[in-house]
Image (cartoon, helix red, strand yellow):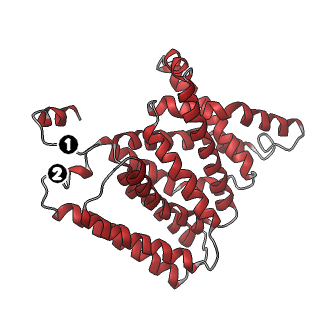
């Protein structure tokens, strides 16, 4: 099986349980949590870079204006997504944050079709339309514009597109993203510390430890996601992403006991029915590569090099 699929599924599984971590540090303001994630992630990634002796390579890659521009945009999108997500979870809106990540796979598919010229088989549009109707039903059931969900969809969808076309490998790219945010983040936390308003060192050793561990719980799934985004089509990234909101949704309902109406149940069932149809379509398709496409980074065209290309992947 293509490692990209495994990396993507693993990243989204971790993110599905991420509200458990956010709730554990909910005594810390959302902005501070976001900046701690930046600082500790960058420190961890630098250690990895030094251990692998890739510092010279990273510095050479970072000297390009185009590379700096791409990763500046990626870092801003990532920071905005983190902040909105943390605030949403800690304000008791885990279900709405999950809605954002239910919508995002559809947005990822749209971005892939528009910008990367990715294609879906004709019958794959049917479950896509069904999933879209399920998300629309969930949105309408709120009775108000779910701005948290829509903001998460926009920021992470565009971040995924940037990662798909970015020039660097996963480790170097994420190091650059957190590095571009490191000085503002560290400066802000140091400033709060000088005023006695910082959370680190004031709320107990357990909170300090959890904040320090934010580097691991942040960087590991992001590296897995970045690797997956470069190995598999964007539409597949979008489909795998349903793993994360499902976990978040169940946590919101079963663990945090957020409101769960019949309307939301109907929308949830519609979306998973769409995913089931999509999976079944892959099995019953008569094209030789139909199911293989779900497991390979890209569609291989018929050519004398086809078998050799298969080995290379």
Q: Residue furthest left?
A: 304
Within 10 Å of disc 2 (Cα), the crowding (few <14, some 14-19, many 20+) is some
Image point (56%, 78%), residue name: 140
Q: Position of residue 117 (x, y in %)?
A: 35, 49
Q: Position of residue 280 (x, y in %)?
A: 23, 66
Image quadrant where one finds the C terminus: top left
Front-most of residues 53 and 64: 64
Image quadrant where one finds the N terminus: top left
Mark 2 or 1, nearer chain start: 2
Q: Secondary structure at mark 1?
A: loop
Q: Secondary structure at mark 2?
A: loop
Q: Are marks 2 and 1 in contact (CB under 8 Å)?
A: yes
Q: Is residue 293 visible to us here?
A: yes
Q: Residue furthest bottom?
A: 262
Distance between mark 2 and mark 1 Cα atoms: 8 Å
Q: Position of residue 39 (x, y in %)?
A: 67, 35
Quarter location, residue 78 = top right
Q: Does 94 sit left or right of 101 as displayed?
A: right
| Pointer 2 residue | 289
Q: Residue furthest right?
A: 195
Q: Position of residue 56 (x, y in %)?
A: 52, 15
Front-most of residues 302 and 17: 302
Within 10 Å of disc 1 (Cα), the crowding (few <14, some 14-19, many 20+) is some
| Circle number at residue 300 | 1
């Amino acid at each position: 099986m293509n490692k990209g699929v495994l990396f993507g599924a693993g990243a989204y599984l971790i993110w599905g349980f991420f509200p458990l971590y956010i709730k554990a540090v909910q005594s810390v303001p959302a902005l501070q949590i976001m900046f701690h994630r930046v600082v500790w992630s960058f420190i961890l990634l630098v250690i990895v870079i030094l251990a692998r002796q890739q510092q010279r390579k990273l510095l050479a890659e970072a000297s390009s204006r185009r590379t700096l521009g791409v990763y500046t945009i990626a870092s801003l999108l990532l920071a905005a997504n983190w902040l909105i997500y943390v605030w949403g979870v800690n304000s008791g809106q885990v279900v709405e944050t999950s809605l954002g990540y239910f919508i995002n796979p559809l947005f990822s598919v749209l971005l892939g079709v528009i910008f990367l010229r990715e294609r879906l088989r004709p019958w794959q549009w049917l479950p896509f339309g069904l999933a879209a109707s399920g998300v629309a039903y969930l949105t309408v059931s709120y009775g108000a514009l779910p701005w948290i969900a829509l903001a998460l969809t926009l920021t992470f969808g565009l971040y995924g597109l940037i990662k798909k076309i970015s020039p660097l490998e996963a480790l170097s790219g994420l190091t650059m993203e957190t590095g571009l945010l490191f000085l503002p983040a560290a400066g802000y936390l140091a400033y709060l510390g000088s005023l006695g308003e910082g959370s680190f060192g004031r709320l107990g050793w357990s909170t300090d430890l959890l904040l320090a561990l934010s580097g691991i719980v942040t960087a590991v799934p992001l590296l897995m996601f970045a690797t997956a985004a470069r190995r598999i089509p964007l539409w597949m990234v979008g489909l795998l992403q349903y793993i994360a909101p499902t976990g978040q949704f169940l946590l919101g309902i079963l663990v945090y006991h957020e409101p769960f109406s019949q309307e939301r149940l109907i929308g949830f069932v519609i979306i998973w029915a769409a995913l089931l149809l999509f999976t079944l379509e892959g099995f019953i398709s008569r094209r030789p590569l139909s199911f293989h496409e779900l497991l390979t980074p890209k569609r291989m065209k018929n050519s004398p090099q086809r078998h050799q290309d298969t080995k290379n992947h």
